[in-house]
């Protein structure tokens, strides 16, 4: 028999939870914006938890961060400037910096305590990305940064929203609105694309559908896809929007060609995975 260990109760939905054994709590604190914990779990290794929702774990974070970042980056083809909103653990930053064409990645996270904790406690996630000379990390409100960037006339090729869920903390909810997405569209250079994680369409169908409608009201091309994340206990949804490029139009061969040209190596994402993601049904509840 395995030794008795304390457990962490992970919130899957308001009515469902996932119980996992833990080995240690490395950090637990209330930041200015949210409850944060860094824990060591038996099955998933080290994990970042915000307001009761696991954000990333060592064991399965590539299943989240690679589909978040690469379909949009590959669809653009040759991104030079990338904006990441959120992404405090640095893993999305890590993936975006893999592209040879990238000259600058601006990462904006409102919670400096999360970024500080990630630098110290989550080295396998950021893998030194914070120290890359092409990375510009700003601790400020994402909406404020976008307003300032628009005023300066800045442009980005790819915008990645790696935020807490649409049904999560209030600090992120306004960033999924059609009004804010319109501002992100105005930030895009020609050929640009916006991508976000959009929570879960099975347990939070109404909230997910609202985000999807907002994208459809702003962008010409909208691609939705999802992937099961073991430590989340559900399939996380992603939505990409652009007026120029459509990730659904790429063949497996073209995706692999673009990854090779950019010198990108991945643990999970590939051309075959890309086409599978774009064609797999979205999880919704069947109504009996």
Image (tube, helix red, strand yellow):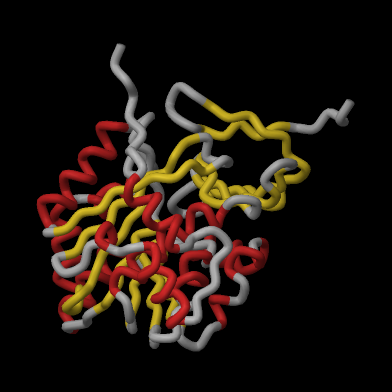
Give the image location of residue 20, x and y in percent.
Answer: 67, 33
Q: Is residue 110 visible?
A: no
Residue at horizontal 43 percent and vertical 62 percent from the top: 271
Tell me: residue 39, above or below residue 153.
above
Q: Is residue 105 left or right of residue 121?
A: left
Foreground pick, 238 / 121: 238
Above or below, 41 against 129 in this view is above
Q: Is residue 167 visible?
A: yes
Q: Tell me which residue sits at (55%, 52%) in the image.
A: 56
Identify the residue at image location x=71%, y=43%: 41
Q: Position of residue 234 (x, y in %)?
A: 47, 36
Q: Is residue 144 above or below residue 13?
A: below
Q: In the figure, is residue 151 to the left or right of 286?
A: left
Q: Quadrant of the C terminus?
A: top left
Image x and y of residue 101, in percent: 39, 86
| Image quadrant assignment for residue 143 | bottom left
């Amino acid at each position: 028999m395995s030794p008795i260990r304390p457990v962490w109760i992970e919130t899957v939905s308001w009515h469902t939870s996932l119980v996992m054994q833990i080995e240690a709590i490395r950090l637990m604190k209330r930041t200015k914006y949210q409850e944060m914990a860094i824990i060591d779990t038996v099955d998933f290794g080290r994990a970042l938890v915000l307001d009761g929702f696991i954000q990333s774990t060592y064991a399965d974070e590539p299943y989240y961060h690679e589909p978040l970042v690469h379909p949009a980056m590959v669809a653009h083809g040759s991104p030079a400037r990338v904006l990441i909103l959120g992404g405090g653990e640095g893993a999305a930053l890590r993936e975006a910096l893999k592209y040879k064409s990238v000259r600058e990645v601006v990462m904006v996270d409102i919670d400096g305590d999360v970024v500080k904790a990630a630098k110290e406690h989550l080295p396998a996630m950021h893998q030194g990305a914070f120290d890359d000379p092409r990375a510009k990390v700003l601790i400020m409100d994402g909406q404020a940064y976008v307003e300032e960037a628009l005023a300066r006339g800045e442009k980005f090729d790819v915008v990645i929203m790696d935020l807490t869920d649409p049904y999560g903390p209030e600090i992120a909810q306004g960033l999924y609105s059609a009004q804010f997405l319109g501002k992100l569209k105005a930030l895009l250079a020609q050929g640009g694309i916006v991508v976000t994680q959009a929570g879960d369409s099975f347990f939070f169908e109404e909230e997910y559908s609202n985000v999807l409608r907002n994208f459809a009201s702003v962008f010409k091309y909208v691609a939705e896809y999802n992937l099961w994340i073991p430590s989340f206990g559900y399939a996380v949804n992603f939505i990409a929007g652009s007026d120029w490029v459509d990730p659904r139009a790429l063949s497996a061969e073209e995706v692999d060609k673009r990854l090779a040209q950019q010198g990108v190596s991945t643990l999970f994402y590939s051309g075959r995975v890309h086409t599978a993601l774009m064609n797999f049904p979205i999880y919704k509840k069947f109504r009996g």
